[in-house]
Image: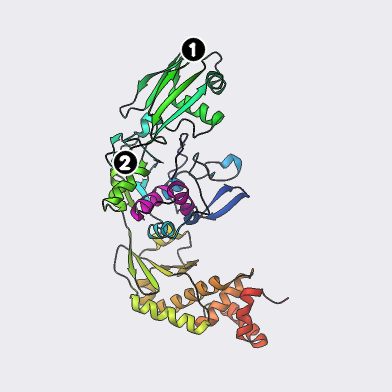
Amino acid sequence: MGKALRPPVILLALALSAAPQTVSVRTPDGVSRLPVESAVAAAVAGEMGGVSQLEALKAMAVAARTYMRVNPGRHREEGYDFCPTTHCQRLDFSGKSSLIEQAVAETEGVILWYRGAPALVFHSADCGGSTASAGEIWPGLARPYLPAEEDPWCRRSPSPSWTAQIPWSDASAALGIPGIRFLAVERRSSSGRVLSLRSNRGPIDAESFHLAVGRLLGWNLLRSRLYEVESLPSAAVFRGRGAGHGAGLCQKGAIELAKTGADLREILAFYFPGAVPGLTPQGLFWQRHKGESVELWTAGGATVLSPSAAETAWREARRRSSLNASCRLRIREYPTVDLFRDTTGARGDFAAVTRGCTIHLNQPVRLQSQGRLAQVLLHEMMHVLIGANRRALLPEWFEEGLAEYLAGGTTRASERARVEALIRRHGLASVLRFLQSGLPQ
């Protein structure tokens, strides 16, 4: 669970265009570009790793995804979008449990909206029993859906207290003000957070103080702004509770709320009153129809495919190809071209796009009326199987041609012809082994 004070988040954009499908993040190995949903999973693991309440994890996934949508290029000057620390969102790429993967998959593409635009979101580990309004922490970022509220769910379990001691020399160095020897709370917000401090060198803005201390001494030292301060001869001693700025989603409270049976919509409604979670500003949401080995996901309506038809097609794809996949197949049906394009980032004239073990179908009703649905589905299933068995770097024409050959399609005739030539020369079994070894020179 994220446990550090976060410096202010600067609102960079409220994009209404298609959601980006990849983000660049700084990792120990350098800068990596990865799918947004992979970054969301890493953020949930970093912020709430080890949590066993699925609905709380789903709420966190929506918050993390919204943050990435609203704040692209947060580190643009350094050449990437996000850092892996609490300055942005804590990212843990090795701690993604199956429950976290489920939470991310069940909310894929879902963000928070307010009056037709992506919402400004914040989250913290422990609000200390009272959430903060965004405006009290960051003047200029006040939002009606980010108010200061009592949080009875966070109070269900005690907030651990913390103590921090800052030598006067460090306080002076952090602020660039020599000779500081006294600090006291001067003013608090309605949620009890410190807004300003009194010193022997004049008033000090609490947020500026927190930022200065965080940069010099680390973001985990002053864990929140719910504290008392005592001035000793050699240092200032801070005694507080909570962890983080306290605005928006309180992770500790969300966990307790989920324990009562609340779902992600109820959790998000409590922490972001008036904001709407959904694929669209109207709150369109995924509905899951679970089969034996295939999951069908529809956006707000009945499936065009039946679970049994999808299972039959999946068995046929595996029979024809002699390939298998260990992952669970997901098929997502998009009722409109706009939703397909904006969620996947693919062109609107694409019939489908496959990523990993998920097939995204563009307007399956239209495909069915054109008599193309079965063939498109079989082709995309071949891509799932090819991707699951590929270990070598292969050209696009080979994968497209192989999928077309195995599915019996004719829309990619030139690519299929090249693969058929390989099959005549080497045999199908050998061509399938190229997935492991690569194409012969």
Q: Is residue 210 visible?
A: yes
Residue 274 place in picture, x, y as percent: 28, 43
Q: Tell me the kind of residue under disc 1.
A: Arg
Q: Does residue 318 belong to the magenta stretch?
A: no
The answer to whether residue 67 is left or right of residue 190 is right
Q: Residue at x 34, y 35 (%)?
A: 128
The answer to whether residue 358 is left or right of residue 264 is right
Q: Which residue has dot 2 on it?
A: 157
Which label sits in the foreground, 2 or 1? 2
Q: Which residues are magenta?
A: 40-64
Q: Residue at x 44, y 59 (%)?
A: 101
Disc number placed over residue 201 in the picture, else none: 1
The disc, 2 or 1, on the residue closer to the chain's N-terminal end is 2
Quadrant in which the N terminus appears: top left
Identify the main secondary structure in magenta: helix
Callout 1: helix, strand or loop?
Answer: loop
